[in-house]
Image: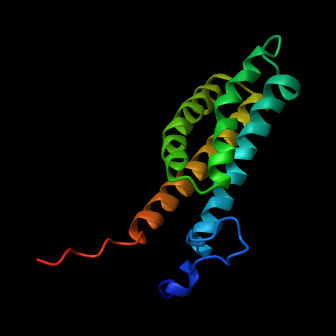
Amino acid sequence: MSPPSSAAQTPASPADPHAGEPRPDAVVSSLRAVALAALLGLIVLGLAWELWLAPTGSGTLAIKVLPLFFGVAGLLRHRMYTFRWLSLLVWLYFTEGVVRAVTERGWSMALAIIEIVLCLVLFSACAAYIRWRLKHAPRPAPEPA
């Protein structure tokens, strides 16, 4: 696979509201799509798990997915800060998945394994996105001596 060309980073058309901002290349867009899919999967899984599939009480544990909602807008806008904090936050959900996979049986154990997989996918996509963006960030021109 050849390195991305500078044409993928050309400014948008003047009619575009994001004129002047570089367009994300294909790798960045696909990593964001994977991260967004995993994030939305974690949100849906958390809500369905606590409200319908294997509720552990009155459904109040469903609020555990609230922090994940804040990440959706940042991922859609390619905010590097969101990818960074989300890659740290996901480990709380990973830990919950591991604990529940070990301590619970049946349907809840299967849901916990799905949570673990979604967390690993989300972390991997966020880490790859961050690395790619930092590696391909425009470098400032050196100042003349």
Residue, far front: 14
- Residue drawn at (65%, 67%), measured in percent from left and top? 30
Viewer-nearest residue: 117 or 136: 136
Q: Position of residue 97 (x, y in %)?
A: 62, 32
The correct choice, above or below, for 19 with respect to 4 in the image is above
Viewer-nearest residue: 120 or 100: 120
The correct choice, above or below, for 19 with respect to 69 in the image is below
**As drawn, is 12 to the left or to the right of 129?**
right
- Residue drawn at (42%, 69%), measured in percent from left and top? 137
Image quadrant in which you'd find residue 104: top right
Image quadrant in which you'd find residue 113: top right
- Residue drawn at (57%, 71%), measured in percent from left and top? 20
Total numbered badges shown on the rendered structure: 0
Q: Position of residue 138 (x, y in %)?
A: 40, 72
The correct choice, above or below, for 11 with respect to 66 in the image is below
**As drawn, is 110 to the left or to the right of 8?**
right
Q: Is residue 106 visible?
A: no
Viewer-nearest residue: 73 or 58: 73
Q: Is residue 93 visible?
A: yes
- Residue drawn at (63%, 51%), measured in percent from left and top? 75
Q: Position of residue 73 (x, y in %)?
A: 68, 46
Q: Position of residue 9 (x, y in %)?
A: 54, 78
Which image quarter is the C terminus in? bottom left
